[in-house]
Image (cartoon, rainbow, N blue to C red):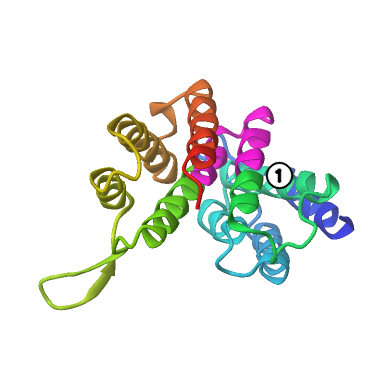
Amino acid sequence: MRRVDEILDKGNHVLSTRRGTRFENVDHTAFYEFRTSSLSFLLSVFGERHPYYSEFDHLCNSASPHDVNKGIGILKGVRAELAGGWLVTAKGLAAAEVFSDFIEMALYLLAENYKDPSAVLAGSVLEEHLRQLCIKNSIDITYTDRTGKLLPKKADTMNADLSKAGVYNTLDQKNVTAWLDLRNKAAHGRYAEYTKDQAEVMAKGIRDFVTRNTL
């Protein structure tokens, strides 16, 4: 907890260095100290394949107030989980519990008005759940391209394959398609193309979908 608070203080300090009018930025040295400290902490606690680490690395990668705010939002979600005792063992939770925790974190971020990190995090939960559902139902999660290279299937393809196999119905498939589209908008910086309310509907819908379609 103390370490998270220390890193959050670094983030707030970085925001205090913001400058510029039309194109705001922050002190580069302070930013990279904040980013490095955050990634080091997340890596040591959760590992590099954990969504906390990967989403922070992806969303907080430039010396701008916007990116710093996204990073702070993710760290606040981590702190809330630690404070609430939700992460009893960060690396030993069952998949369903992990997904549930991530969705709760996404909803927490929404409550704190961080709709964009929330949408990316909820979408990451959905994509990983689709992958695990494919594995459970003996559906390939990779394909071979024309050059013979083995590549991972995209989430939309896994969604179609799962529906075709009868794992869930066409209504679920359509909902998943819409959620993946919103997640892509968030991940590619198209923040004006969806609202906080839509992000909330998405997070709650994914929570219901994961609950009904268990691993």
Main SS category, magenta section: helix
Query: Relative to residue 37, is residue 26 depicted above or below?
Result: above
Which residue is rendered at x = 74% and y = 43% of the image?
Answer: 16
Residue farthest along the right direction in this orientation: 2
Residue 80 within the segment the image draws in magenta = no
Front residue (pair 61, 132): 132
- Residue 1: image location, x then y, percent: 86, 55
Residue farthest along the left direction in this orientation: 146
Q: Which stretch did the figure color magenta?
A: 103-122
Q: Quadrant of residue 115?
A: top right
- Residue 117: image location, x then y, percent: 56, 42
Which residue is rendered at x = 50% and y = 38% of the image?
Answer: 212
Front residue (pair 142, 193): 142
What residue is pinned by disc 1?
77
Three-letter amino acid code of the residue under disc 1: Gly
Q: Secondary structure at mark 1?
A: helix
- Residue 198: image location, x then y, percent: 47, 24
Q: Quadrant of residue 113?
A: top right
